[in-house]
Image (cartoon, grey):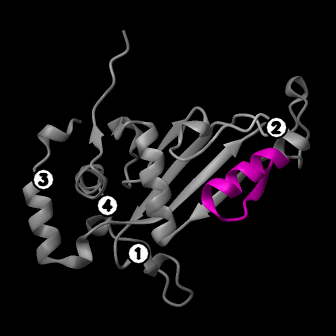
């Protein structure tokens, strides 16, 4: 699906008429899949903390893989969840690395999307430190609308109706308007 086939004006007018339908970014999760514990993971956690300004949490392996030298329960990754203004600022910097272009296939049926960055030093304002090394990362963005709290609250919890869920087209229009991102399929030669 290309961004040319979507009626932008329809969504923009609809969101202006009814602000409860306007999508927003709930959170941005930044994940470093290191694949090993020890000193390499500590370095990755330091890099992630310097990039985001928040303390990362460790992710543990779910199973043992002998060929890779990974044991069940061993910490092998780190991640940070960003919300609010921090999420917007980091997302702007991360999108500059991918030149404000994303593949429309990276959006799921609920409007969430993710993309990868091969080297963290590509982010603007980050310098290479030979003692820390270079790490790749995954950036996952979760979208929501006002009213999504009904699935998280304790009393009278309900699921989000199909008519209120965010679609792939709405995410494309929102990201084009808010961040200037273009969604085009990349053709490999």
**Which of the two discs, 4 and 3, sits closer to the camera?**
3
Q: Which residue is mark 1?
A: 148
Give the residue at x 47% y 71%: 84
Q: Position of residue 121 (x, y in %)?
A: 60, 38
Q: Between marks 2 and 1, how big is the CA–CA gap?
A: 43 Å
> Residue 81 appears in which quarter of the rendering?
bottom right
**Contact, CB < 8 Å: mark 1 with mark 4?**
no
**Which of the two discs, 2 and 3, sits closer to the camera?**
2
Q: Between marks 1 and 4, how big is the CA–CA gap?
A: 10 Å
Crowding near the residue tagged with mark 3, few <14, some 14–19, many ≥20 C-alpha atoms within 10 Å? some
Left or right: 114 in relation to 80: left
Crowding near the residue tagged with mark 4, few <14, some 14–19, many ≥20 C-alpha atoms within 10 Å? many
Q: Which residue is mark 4?
A: 166
Q: Position of residue 122 (x, y in %)?
A: 54, 36
Whether residue 63 is visible to the viewer of this picture, yes or no, is: no
Q: Earlier in the sequence, mark 2 or mark 3?
A: 3
């Amino acid at each position: 699906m290309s961004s040319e086939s979507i009626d932008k004006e329809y969504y923009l007018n609809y969101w202006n008429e009814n602000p409860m339908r306007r999508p927003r970014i709930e959170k941005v999760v930044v994940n470093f899949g290191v694949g090993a514990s020890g000193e390499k993971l500590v370095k990755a956690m330091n890099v992630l903390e310097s990039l985001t300004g928040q303390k990362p949490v460790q992710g543990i392996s779910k199973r043992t893989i002998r060929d890779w030298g990974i044991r069940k329960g061993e910490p092998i990754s780190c991640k940070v969840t960003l919300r609010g203004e921090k999420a917007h600022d980091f997302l702007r910097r991360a999108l500059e690395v991918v030149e404000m272009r994303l593949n429309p296939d990276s959006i799921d049926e609920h409007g969430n999307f993710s993309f990868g960055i091969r080297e963290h030093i590509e982010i603007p304002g980050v310098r290479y430190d030979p003692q820390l090394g270079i790490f790749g990362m995954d950036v996952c963005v979760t979208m929501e609308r006002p009213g999504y709290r009904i699935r998280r609250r304790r009393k009278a919890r309900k699921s989000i109706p199909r008519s209120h869920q965010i679609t792939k087209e709405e995410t494309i229009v929102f990201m084009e308007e808010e961040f200037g991102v273009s969604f085009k399929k990349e053709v490999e030669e």
